[in-house]
Image (cartoon, helix red, strand yellow):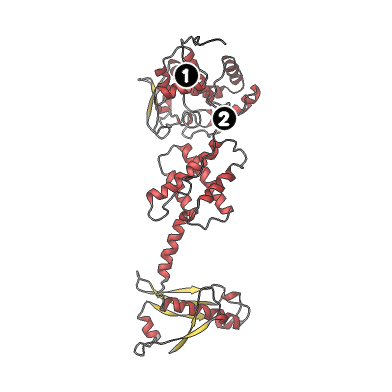
Amino acid sequence: AYLIPCLDEGSNPSGSTFKPLTLNKLAVFTDKILTRMNFKRPDIYDAGGDLKKQWFVFYSYLNPETNKFERFKVFKNINSAKTKSERYEIANFYKEVYRRWLEEEGGSPFELSKNRDLEVAQNIITCIDGFLSFVESSKLRPNMKRKYKYELNIFKEWLIAQRLNYLKIGEVKKQHIFNFVEDIKKRPGVTSGKTVNHYLNDIRRFFNHYIDNYDDYLYRNPAAKITRDIVEERGNIAFTDEEFESLRKHILDSDPYLWFVCQVIYYTGLRNEAEALELRCGDIDYNNKIFYVESWVAKNKVRQAVPIYPDFMDLVESLNLKQYPADWYLFGRKDQPGPVRVGTDNFARRFRPVKKHFGFGDEYGLYCFKSTRACHLYDDGADLRDIQILFRHKDLLATVKYLKSLGRVERGRAFDKGRKI
């Protein structure tokens, strides 16, 4: 019989107690017999008693793939001790802990490695990085990729700042998401519930990605039932005839190329940042007088053919776009078509001094040229169906709602019924 420490988790060498361990007399544990097993007993490396060198506990374990023994070192806090006796006490403590783990609990460093790899894979920060890599390789339109990258990196930075980066994805709680959303509301530049809801929506999609595509990562979406922020609908804004004419003259004098950008948005009905900037020279079909909005650009993710009005055809023909490769962007660098698209904020930034000149608020932007086109078509008697096709609305009801938000009501109605009181 031998005496071994009875070690509980959190115990220390000096507080160890002992109990008898009876071994089978016919199976004496010698090193020779142990080498026939899958491990060799732990021992202490004391550097010959030199306290200036690193001490550690070591043991060997049979690699199941190579069938050869590999040595493992345990450093822990052994070298924190300043005297030999203290180091031996701590080292002997870990020596016995690992002996017990190997002999009595059947522990394996290779199983630990597998568990550690799984923990790393399911770590919330690792999962965010993995999701962003998936998004980057997907067919999502570029502005959506940038949006995911921006918002989820802010979420990642918040987790790190809150010291929650150690969590597995399945350990993230609803309270964590709620606290993050509340902090987003306090960020500079966040002035609307719509922006807050964008963060919440994309975080929901992030968690759903792992629920839908991975086994045993998480079984519920912690962001699923977080209350969305209230959104104040500002409606769409169009320029009046006087504002439009003044803008045209001012922009032509100060930034002629910017007026070209305004013309494209006006004639095509494209959203300036999400769609117009993605327009390529090959998207224009001169023979059939249509241009295409590709599926990875369009809001409904379906490739759409849009009619080219005569004024827009005259504009693109004046640019001689056929001389450029089909995959070149209409809005390239240096105010000309090119293989690299202009930056997302380029034209919005150039439009800001124009807004300041006319005293327009933040709600005014290049998007207003799109809305102004809808008003002009309606006021000039265009059929609602034609407006629907140009603006790619899913049905006439969406077109009517859009026009209504711009202050246009049904033509030809007298609105003279009722009583005067």
Whether residue 268 is visible to the viewer of this picture, yes or no, is no
| Callout in the foreground (1, 2) | 2
Residue in the picture at 57% in, 30% down: 348
- Residue 90, x across and y down, in percent: 56, 79
Residue situated in front as seen by the camera: 288 or 354: 354
Q: Which three-letter amino acid code belongs to the residue tagged 1?
A: Leu
Q: In this view, does 58 lie to the left or right of 158?
A: left
Mark 1 neighbour density, 10 Å: few (under 14) some (14–19) many (20 or more) = some
Mark 2 neighbour density, 10 Å: few (under 14) some (14–19) many (20 or more) = some
In the depicted structure, whether residue 9 falls above or below residue 129: below
Mark 2, secondary structure of its residue: helix
Q: Residue 348 carries which label?
A: 2
- Check if mark 1's residue and mark 2's residue have beta carbons within 8 Å: no
Count of numbered badges drawn on the protein: 2
Q: In this view, does 42 lie to the left or right of 289?
A: right
Reading the image, the residue beneath label 1 is 315
Residue in the picture at 50% in, 85% down: 18
